[in-house]
């Protein structure tokens, strides 16, 4: 069997979409997979079982990326075509079964919506597949001793979703303190290459020998492997947050001007905490997408620590 899987340009959406890909990979062992997605998301699919090809789709004028995709796959027969971008492509390719997502349903989480699309009562957790090379690299990057690893995502693709850096610094100090929830933890700081500058105050607040910093200097599957070796992830609403949840580690997403009911972290031990103001209240207050100022000021460090405590307690009980 052969599957053509068309998914998102955005990293976070692509990670969530792996819940659908996981269904087909696990339901049809040996199914050969071709993935079409944006260049940013492409690396997370490199270790998918029985992967035949990844087709990167950088956006082109007048929909040229769709024409390019059609030309590259039209000569193949597809047993299943999944199009999570709602294009017409699935209908003009030779195939036996077509599944097309037609718009977003803001009443439910995206994973739940995609599960309903493929006929499941409940969605599978997203999954990013790894290979031994990346697991070995992670062990070289992180300390191999008794210390816990606290992964932090202090940045995001838009400033409005970014919790103030001074609160991340305070949070890390309090969690790592002798009486904290993760005393003496090694800090793994993660972000995109263009986000390092904004995260510098958080990076500089952690002694060099007590931190691992990855802002584009390692590939995404190495980042994923490092997350799988971590004990807790805390970060803004971002693709990294979804990667952490997919790694199966305790994951706490920080939310303000985005909807946790649609994009909260989805994993076996995952939770979210938001500003005291709701999504609707933030936008009714005059917030604008044009501004990159943080809209996360209504989330206190105390509230985040309480959420971390609840999350780790849930892990001890066997899952959130």
Image (spheres, rainbow, N blue to C red):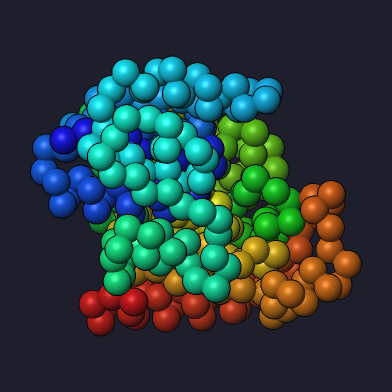
For the C terminus, the quadrant is bottom left
The residue at 65%/63% (across/down) is: 258
Q: Looking at the image, can residue 91 be seen?
A: yes
How many numbered markers are drawn? Answer: 0
Q: In this view, does 96 lie above or below 267?
A: above
Residue 294 position in % (x across, y down): 76, 58
Q: In this view, does 227 lie above or below 64?
A: below
Left or right: residue 319 compared with residue 162: left
Q: In this view, does 307 lie above or below 198?
A: below
Query: Foreground residue, 172 or 281?
Result: 281
Q: Quadrant of residue 111?
A: bottom left
Residue 235 position in % (x across, y down): 54, 58
Q: Which residue lies furthest to the right in this view?
A: 286
Query: Foreground residue, 116 or 278?
Result: 116
The residue at 74%/74% (across/down) is: 280
Residue 297 position in % (x across, y down): 75, 68
Query: Foreground residue, 136 or 279?
Result: 279
Residue 147 position in % (x across, y down): 31, 56
The residue at 47%/61% (across/down) is: 110
Query: Foreground residue, 69 or 310?
Result: 69
Q: In which quarter of the image is residue 220?
A: top left
Left or right: residue 248 compared with residue 59: left
Left or right: residue 139 compared with residue 169: left
The residue at 15%/52% (across/down) is: 27
Q: In which quarter of the image is residue 136?
A: top left
């Amino acid at each position: 069997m052969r599957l053509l899987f068309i998914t998102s340009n955005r990293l976070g959406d692509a990670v969530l979409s792996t819940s659908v890909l996981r269904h087909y990979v696990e339901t049809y062992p040996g199914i050969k997979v071709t993935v079409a997605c944006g260049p940013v998301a492409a690396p997370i699919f490199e270790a998918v079982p029985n992967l035949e090809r990844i087709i990167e789709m950088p956006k082109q004028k007048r929909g040229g990326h769709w024409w390019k995709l059609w030309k590259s796959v039209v000569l193949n027969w597809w047993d299943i075509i999944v199009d999570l971008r709602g294009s017409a492509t699935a209908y003009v390719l030779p195939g036996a079964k077509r599944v097309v997502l037609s718009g977003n349903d803001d009443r439910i989480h995206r994973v739940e919506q995609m599960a309903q699309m493929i006929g499941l009562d409940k969605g599978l957790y997203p999954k990013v597949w790894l290979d031994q090379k990346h697991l070995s690299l992670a062990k070289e990057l992180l300390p191999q001793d008794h210390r816990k690893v606290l992964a932090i995502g202090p940045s995001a693709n838009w400033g409005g979703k970014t919790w103030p850096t001074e609160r991340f610094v305070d949070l890390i100090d309090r969690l790592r303190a002798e009486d904290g929830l993760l005393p003496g933890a090694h800090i793994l700081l993660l972000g995109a290459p263009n986000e390092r500058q904004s995260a510098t105050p958080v990076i500089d607040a952690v002694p060099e020998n007590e931190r691992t910093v990855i802002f584009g200097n390692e590939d995404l599957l190495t980042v994923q492997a490092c997350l799988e070796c971590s004990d807790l992830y805390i970060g803004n609403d971002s693709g990294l947050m979804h990667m952490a949840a997919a790694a199966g580690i305790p994951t706490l997403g920080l939310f303000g001007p985005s909807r946790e009911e649609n994009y909260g972290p989805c994993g076996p031990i995952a939770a979210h905490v938001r500003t005291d103001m709701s999504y609707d209240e933030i936008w009714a207050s005059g917030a604008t997408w044009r501004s990159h100022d943080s809209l996360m000021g209504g989330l206190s460090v105390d509230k985040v620590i309480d959420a971390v405590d609840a999350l780790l307690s849930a892990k001890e009980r066997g899952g959130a």
